[in-house]
Image (spheres, rainbow, N blue to C red):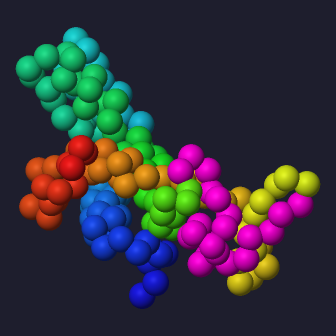
Amino acid sequence: MNDGTVHDDPVTAALVAFLRARLEEDERAARAATGGPWTADPVTGVVRGADAAVVAEVRVSAADALHLARHDPRRALLRAYALRQVVDAAATGCGPACRAEHAFDRGCALHRLGPVHEQDGARWLIDDTGARHEPPPVVTAWTLRLLALPYAHHPDHRPEWAPGR
């Protein structure tokens, strides 16, 4: 199966696979939960889903109820979608040739994704269907390590993925 990963570095490729798996888990959990948006009553601590069903009754503090409602399934799905775009951009695997922007030379991973076209200073890729795409942003391994921090408790998380390693 081609998962879109073209990164040559096995550590980064493993980190990309780890993040994709965690995002899939997050999406499954969000889709299985009561639909959002969720709202919280700060007086009673009751958190309700979009259909007004009680999702939770928080008895510790109003702040806990508001926090729970703030991170409803709708937000979790949007977050997973946004993070997947960053992870997919990182999967292109640009090396040192591409720092803040794509170099568009032979050291740039975009050449492995398809021909790079340029006209009037704009650059784009053409996929095998003929569709035109803007190049994804350059995402560093450091960025991926930061994205993995919320999952540091997961049994598949590796110590070498910690930022600063």
Residue in the image at 25% along x and 15% along y = 42
Residue at 67%, 78% in the rendered image = 114
Q: Is residue 108 left or right of residue 144?
A: right
Dominant SS of magenta comes to loop
In front here: 67 or 160? 160
Judge whether 19 appears above or below 127 on screen. above
Could you say which is closer to the camera, residue 69 or residue 45? 69
- Give residue 67's position: percent from left, percent from top: 26, 26
Q: In the rendered view, does 103 fall on the left or right side of 109?
A: right
* Nearer to the camera, 139 or 131: 139
Q: Identify the residue at the far top of this view.
A: 43
Q: Is residue 56 above or below residue 160?
A: above
Question: Does the rendering let one see residue 157?
Answer: yes
Residue 78 on the magenta span: no
16 is higher (above) or lower (below) than 146: below
Residue 109 belongs to magenta span: yes
Residue 54: which quarter of the image? top left
Instruction: Pick the quarter of the image with the N terminus.
Output: bottom left
Percent from the top left, x then y, of residue 158? 15, 60
Q: Residue furthest bottom?
A: 1
Report the span colored magenta: 99-119
Q: Can see residue 154?
A: no
Where does residue 87 sit, x and y in percent of width and height? 43, 58
Residue 97 spot, x, y in % from top left: 55, 60
Q: Quadrant of residue 108?
A: bottom right
**Observer-nearest residue: 117 or 126?**
117
**How many marks overall?**
0
Q: Residue at x 66, y 67 (%)?
A: 105
In the figure, is residue 120 to the left or right of 7?
Answer: right
Residue at the spot 64% in from the left edge and 59% down from the top edge: 103
